[in-house]
Amino acid sequence: MGLTLVTGPAVEPVSLAEAKVHLRVDDDDSNELIVALIAAARQHVESFTRRQLITQTWDYQLDAFPAEAIVVPLAPVSAVSSISYLDSTGSTQTWSSSNYRTDLPAGPWAQRPRIEPGYGLSYPTTYGVLNAVTVRCVTGYGSTASTVPAAIRAAMKILIGHWFESREAVSRDVGMPIPIGVDALLWPFKVW
C-alpha cells in the first residue's frame, strides 16, 4: 500500500505577499526563504492533519481489493478519477465508475472517503502482486487559497513566523519546537 503524488498544488494556501505582511518584511531580500517556509509550513500542516489543502491528485495503491470498503487515507477528497487494477492475467483494467459508489465527505472537517462496490456487485479479482489496485483521487479544499479554512491558514502563518525568526534548530531547553498556537489551531482538523 502506498500514496503517490501525481499532481501537486498549483498555489500555496498562503501567498508570498500575505506571509510578508505577517512577518512585517518590506523588502525582497528574503523572498526565496519565505517561499520555502510557506511550502514547508503547508507540508507540515498536511502531514500533521493528514489533509491536503490545495487541489492535488494522488494515487492510492493497494495490493488487492479489500473485503470491505476502500478507505482512502486522504481528506478531503472531491472526486475519485479512476480505479485501475491488474486482472487475474496481469493486464491493466479500469473498473467502471458505474460498478462502485463513493462516500466523499465535504467541508472543513471532512473525514476519509470510502469506496465500495455498487449494490449486488463485488470487487474484481486481481493479480497477486504488490500494488495491483490504484485509486486515483482529487484531494484538497479547492484550487485557491480562499478555500482553505482560516484556522489552517493562521496556523501556517504562525509557523512561518516562528521558522523565519528561529532559523537554527530550537532545543526544548530554549523554546518550543512548534508554537503551541499551531497545534491548537490544527487539532480540530486532524483526520483519524
Image (spheres, helix red, strand yellow):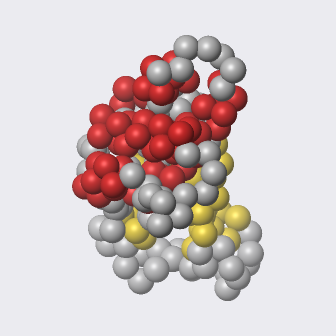
The C terminus: image quadrant: bottom left
- At 48% from the left and 60% from the top, the residue drawn is 174
Q: Residue 129 is drawn in which quadrant?
A: bottom right
- Specify whether 28 is left or right of 91: left
| Residue that lies at the very extreme toward the right in this rendered image | 90
Residue 98 lies, in percent from the top left, at 42, 54
Residue 182 lies, in percent from the top left, at 36, 50
- At 56% from the left and 29% from the top, the residue drawn is 11
Residue 150 lies, in percent from the top left, at 30, 34
Taking depth in this image into account, of 59 and 11 the one nearest to the observer is 11
Residue 42 lies, in percent from the top left, at 51, 44
Vertical order, 91 against 137 (above or below): below
- Specify whether 156 is left or right of 166: left
Q: Residue 101 is drawn in which quadrant?
A: bottom left
Residue 29 in sight in this render: yes
Vertical order, 39 against 145 (above or below): below
